[in-house]
Structures are given as C-alpha cells and as structure tokens.
Image (spheres, rainbow, N blue to C red):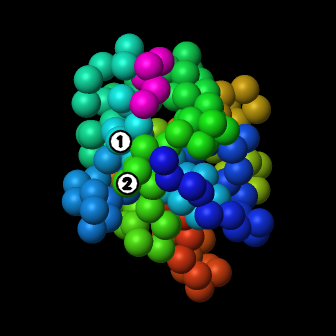
Amino acid sequence: MTSLQSDFGSHFGIENIPFGIASSDKHNHPQAVTRIENNVVFLADIVQSASDLQSLPGGIFSQPTLNTFAALGRPAHRLVRSAVQKLVKENKLPENSTEDITKCQMHLPVSVADFTDFSCSEYHNLNAGLAAMGRKGLPPSWGFIPPGEFNALYSLMPAYHVQAMLAGVQASRFLELL
C-alpha cells in the first residue's frame, strides 16, 4: 500500500478532500483526482479498493472533467470523500494511485459552455454604470433583483491562473464541490 508523505505547510489534510482533474506521466489522460497533503490521488485507481465506490457509475473518475461526477450530487461527493478518508486512515491506498503534486499537470476541472455572472456589489455596479453609460449610478432594480451579465466561455479565466499571475507562483487547480 502507498504511504503518504507529509508536508505540514499543506492545507490539504484528511479533513479537506477537494476534487480536481489531473494527468501525469503515469496517468496520461486527464482524470478525476483529489489531493491529500502534497499527493494527488487518482480516484479511478482506488475504486476496486473501496467497495462503496463500486456503486457509482462505471468510468466516472476516468472522464476529463468533473461535470458528470458533479451532477451526481452531494450524497455521491460525501461517499467518495468518506471512502478516501477511510483508505488513508487504514493506509490502504493502492500502489501507484498517488503521485507527488509536482509530477502532475492540473487541468480545468469542469467544462463550461456559457454562464451568467450575477453582481450584488454596489461598488461594482456603480463602476459598471460608469463604464456602460458614462455616469455612476445603480440600475433601478439593483436593490431587489441582482443584475446579470451573460458571459461566454472565452471570458472565463480560471481563478488559479489569476492567483498565479498575482502571486507570481504556481497555484493549485482544485474544484471544491460542496
């Protein structure tokens, strides 16, 4: 069984089981993962070791996005988190199911066609009014209907990319499904 290396500076302990998409030299295709400390756990590799996970749709963790897994809902997410925690506590993660995060390439975890961005910030809406109409002012419906702006995929910049640009460091790319 795989033993996890420890890094006390990490924010990814056993209590925080995020989901993401990663690939590596050993796992050539982007697939569902989680992170524990500085280890990426490839979820498709642990299904046979966790009987609870065998009730999930076949191949759910081999897909290049989390869209199908996310659509299963919170009960499925909790089931996976619980199974991962149990395997880690019992030191029963299968060999080759984990890799150091520095050896993995993280990918955008979801496929997004388009989206609506709702803004409830008075500051943002005042500045948007200035940009759109040449004057600062809130829309008449601002107090009871949040303004929405339709966006296409090309306008979506993953938060990890922005964080990396601002901090000048490489950031993790995990999606936390609540």
* Residue 175 seen from this side: no
Q: Quick check: is 126 in the magenta stretch? A: no
Q: Position of residue 41 (x, y in %)?
A: 47, 50
Disc 1 + disc 2, Cβ < 8 Å = yes
Residue 45, numbered circle: 1
Residue with the most extreme bottom position = 168
Q: What secondary structure characterizes most of the magenta part?
A: helix
Q: Residue at x 25, y 30 (%)?
A: 59
Foreground: 136 or 31?
31
Q: Picture quarter containing residue 162?
A: bottom right
Which one is in front, 139 or 121? 121
Mark 2 = which residue?
96
Magenta range is: 49-53
Relative to 30, is 169 above or below? Answer: below
Q: CA distance from mark 1 to mark 2?
A: 8 Å
**Where does the image place residue 26, in percent across and percent down from the top left?**
28, 62
